[in-house]
Image: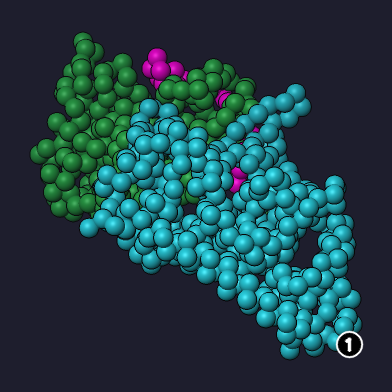
Chain colours: A cyan, B green
Amino acid sequence: MPLDKTGLYFYFIAMLYIKRGNLFQLLESLLGDYRVFVPSRKGDSIAFTAFGETEEDYVIGEFRSFEPLKAFYFLGREKVAVDFSPENPRNDKPPCIVGVKSCDLKGLKILDFVFMDDESGDPTYIKARTEGLIISSDCTKAAETCFCTAMGVNPWPEKEYDINLSEADEGFVVEIGSDKGQKLVDDNLALFEEANEENIRSREFNRESVKQHVEKSVRKKNIPPVERLQRVVRKYYESDVWSEESVNCVECGACNVICPTCHCFLLYDQKSESSLGRYRIWDSCMINDFARVAGGENPRNRLWMRFRNRFEKKFDYFPSVADDIACTGCGRCIAACPGKIDIRQVLAKLGSLR
Amino acid sequence: MKNPYRSIEAEVLKVTTETPTIKTFTLKPKEELTFKPGQFMELSVPGLGEAPFTPSSDSEIKETMEITIVKVGKVTDEIHKLKPGDTVGLRGPLGKGYPMIRFIGQEVLIVGGGVGLAPIRTLMYELFHMRDKLAKLVYRGGCRNPEELIFRKELEGWMKRDDIDMVLTVDEGNDTWNGPVGLVTSIMDGIDMNYSRVKAVVCGPPIMMKFATFKLKELGVIDTNIYLSMEKNMSCGFGKCGHCRIGPYYCCKDGPVFTYDMIRDFPGIWD
């Protein structure tokens, strides 16, 4: 039955549910205030498309998108200053991202740590994060490369979302995760109804089966337990694993750009006829010049050192400074690597050293 | 909200040629811009890019700033083409600088090399301003040859002062040079100081910093008293772009001045 304003108490005592058609109606209504992106099927993968522009085969469930979530908050190439003006040059509508998966939410937490500090926070990132909306969703499938459970992440969002959707029957069980999410539901109450027991049961069944599926594939990979990862990377810092495992690396940087936690960038100045622009562009620590100074010294002049650095950053630096591992188990780096380098195998190899 | 990527417009007032490859630029920022010794600036040639430099002028002078720059790459080539009246961008100050308060009441030993003598000049002005609060001030500086010795006149003037024990050396002498010849490490022995309590500051090319640090340790200076001005690939200047990481630190945000104990265990610190 549909909810009305007098039925507000419902979602304190019961779960909400939204039919697929109503969800798209809700998204339609958001287009005035947000740039809305929804995952849709693109050949074998799932990629975000701007909602409402073309007919798409939207995929709310299944598994993580091809591109990492960071692409909406920390753009691949973004103007961050014009001339000598203190203004933030970006002034478009904030993003509303739909179908965000649990692994990417963990990635966003790492980026928040990097870009949202009080002292010198990144204005465009902060604007997109604070004004944007996240409508996340449970995974209903897992890719062969998924290993979130090995990184302590469940294949369903548990925090960091505004509302979460769990595919169930012909619609979604809805959970509210923030004041913004609460307001979104309050403002569109007619589109929601109360979830019934069957909806909840099918959500729980799906969560458990996807988790088991990922866990089964993780078990075969022998990845060390998440609480041992920092210790393992530190302890075997001088091992041969780094040079052995980086043999097939071609320094393309795909693992960096596709990673939801990689945040390194370079600043690039460009002069047009009328103005000066400063751009923030994704950079890659796998590339030889990354840490080189103008005088020529390069602290990581060997490929295996840069390879090791990437692991050190994710499994030692971030646990040290932010108390969190900067790997989400999304497996995008595995899928993207032309050298077939598998992060699971690297971690397993380190874990097997005695 | 402050935009940390934005540069302040500055005018080039004066260009001084120090050596064939080193020039000092006197800049006048169009907005107030102050810094502390050891902090650095990102200097940009409009539309061509930025690079990090530590000012070489007295930080008490608020209206202008001098930056001494050696020509080594793309951005510095462009900077060296600048003339009085040209416009540049300045972003900063960045980093933490020297903890001057820890030098109060102490014997302070400054070890500088090559173009490292430029940022040390800023520190020296500050140390001279607070000279009555220091137990002792010692300076040991060096560079490759007398032609490459920047601020030579000024440095020779300091050598005549009686409130500083100062010696300069060159790796290779010539007929204008009466001082010692040899690496800076060769003039660090036998100084009348209590090495075990000395506060030592090292600034210079990485290879010089490495051997000066080893020499200080050999003389008995303790790691927590060795202040190193590290050179890494600083780009954003506030710990976000990732290029200048040393272990758990970013050289730009947590440095560029580190005590040796903070960084000694991390690989590639001298490279």
Main secondary structure type of the part rendered in magenta: strand
Foreground residue among A174 and A238: A174
Q: Position of residue A124 (x, y in %)?
A: 68, 50
Q: Position of residue B60 (x, y in %)?
A: 47, 43
Q: Is residue A305 magenta?
A: no
Q: Position of residue B140 (x, y in %)?
A: 23, 34
Q: Position of residue B195 (x, y in %)?
A: 15, 48
Highlighted range, magenta: B2-23
Give left or right: position of A261 versus B96.
right
Viewer can see residue B55? no
The amino acid sitting under disc 1 is Thr
Asked if residue A265 is positioned above or below residue B170 in the image, the reply reads below
Q: Kindly identify which residue carries mark 1.
A: A6
Q: Tag 1's secondary structure? A: helix
- Looking at the image, which residue is at 31% across and 22% down? B149
- Looking at the image, which residue is at 37% across and 54% down? A347
- The chain containing the residue under callout 1 comes to A
Q: Quadrant of residue B102?
A: bottom left
